[in-house]
């Protein structure tokens, strides 16, 4: 048992989840470049991440190009990735549109959402800025019914937490990236993708039905910095009201808001603003339990703070009102009990 005061417990706020979920790439996520017909390279292209081709069998230009990752050509791994790419393409195409915006993205700033254009195409001249607004889970999906064309030296810029892994360019025919341009995100082209000289891609070039063509480029499969898994904490007692000196068991329940995730951490039980009653580790079922007999007669506003050193977010329960009666409840009659929202 522990009782102390004067300790401030700070729970870091959890950033709001993005309204738009990322597109699930399945096993296609393992590839930086993936195509159906051919993959052709000229010059000293560097591909970081897998390179895959299915059902085609022709991969040329490596060397002088280099692949820092696995290469799968016309095998079961590549075939599965292509199937997953097809599903991802259809998923992206089916997303409800948040807004219809002009074809030309250069010179604009976009926040998380799903976008299409009146002409069914997108172009980038200059710089387009994607603003995550402080949310690392912000997702950007650009749906081009026909083409994506970036101008020479154009740039996709990410700010305020936006991440390349959460940017998707769904292209209804072919994507063409202009010389020395910089693209961030995942290109999901129905037909082909042409990456011209000197392009930098912080993302993936995925062509569902045709070819990928490269020329002295740098393509690096992105990784996402993982946001904490959100949790909720609730608190209950074994008996309410209780008597002074009688054992009272407090149980905190912590639930992860992601299916299959099991929170790990410590629960601190606090009376009032800053008096720690005790603490206990979370067990494998998501519960932390303490037993105390030190609460004096009176009304106690109890709170459970879940603190995790791992990938789970901290969370705090609602105040739980515990009544400790100076006389037996049969004499005094119980007041209203339980948690307070």
Image (cartoon, rainbow, N blue to C red):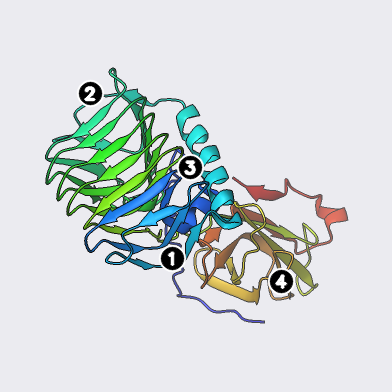
Q: CA distance from mark 3 to mark 2?
A: 23 Å
Q: Are marks 1 and 4 in contact (CB under 8 Å)?
A: no
Q: What residue is shown at x 46% (from left), y 26% (from top)?
A: 96
Q: Where residue 23 is drawn, which disc sits there? A: 3
Q: Where residue 283 is drawn, which disc sits there? A: 4
Local packing at callout 2 (Cα closer than 10 Å; few below 14, some 14-19, many 20+) is some
Question: Which quadrant of the figure has residue 87?
Answer: top right
Question: In the image, residue 188 lies at what x, y percent?
Answer: 40, 40
Q: CA distance from mark 1 to mark 2?
A: 45 Å
Earlier-in-chain disc, 4 versus 2? 2
In this rendering, the label closer to the viewer, 1 or 4 = 4
**Residue 70 or residue 210, whichever sits in front:** 210
Local packing at callout 4 (Cα closer than 10 Å; few below 14, some 14-19, many 20+) is some
| SS of the residue under disc 1 | loop
Q: Where residue 10 is drawn, which disc sits there? A: 1
Q: What residue is shown at x 31% (from left), y 59% (from top)?
A: 61
């Amino acid at each position: 048992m522990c009782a102390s005061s004067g300790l401030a417990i700070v729970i870091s706020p959890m950033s709001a989840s993005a309204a738009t979920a990322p597109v699930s790439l399945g096993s296609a996520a393992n590839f930086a470049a993936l195509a159906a017909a051919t993959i052709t390279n000229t010059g000293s292209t560097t591909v970081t991440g897998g390179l895959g081709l299915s059902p085609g069998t022709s991969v040329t230009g490596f060397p002088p190009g280099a692949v820092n990752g696995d290469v799968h050509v016309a095998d079961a791994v590549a075939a599965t990735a292509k199937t997953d790419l097809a599903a991802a393409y259809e998923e992206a195409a089916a997303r409800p549109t948040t807004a219809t915006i002009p074809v030309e993205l250069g010179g604009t700033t976009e926040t998380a959402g799903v976008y299409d254009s009146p002409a069914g195409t997108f172009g980038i001249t200059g710089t387009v800025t994607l603003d995550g607004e402080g949310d690392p889970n912000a997702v950007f999906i650009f749906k081009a019914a026909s083409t994506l064309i970036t101008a020479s030296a154009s740039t996709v810029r990410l700010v305020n937490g936006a991440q390349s892994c959460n940017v998707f360019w769904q292209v209804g025919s072919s994507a063409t990236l202009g010389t020395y341009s910089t693209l961030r995100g995942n290109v999901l082209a129905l037909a082909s993708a042409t990456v011209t000289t000197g392009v930098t891609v912080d993302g993936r070039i995925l062509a569902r039905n045709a070819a990928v063509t490269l020329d002295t480029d740098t393509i690096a499969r992105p990784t996402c910095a993982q946001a904490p898994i959100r949790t909720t904490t609730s608190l209950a007692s074994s008996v309410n009201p209780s008597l002074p000196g009688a054992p009272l068991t407090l149980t905190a329940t912590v639930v992860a808001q992601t299916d299959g995730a099991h929170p790990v951490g410590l629960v601190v039980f606090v009376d009032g603003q800053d008096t720690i009653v005790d603490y206990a580790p979370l067990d494998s079922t998501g519960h932390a339990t303490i037993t105390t007999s030190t609460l004096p007669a009176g009304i106690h506003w109890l709170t459970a703070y879940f603190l995790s050193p791992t990938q789970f977010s901290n969370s705090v329960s609602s105040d739980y009102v515990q009544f400790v009666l100076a006389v037996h409840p049969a004499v005094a009659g119980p007041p209203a009990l339980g948690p307070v929202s």
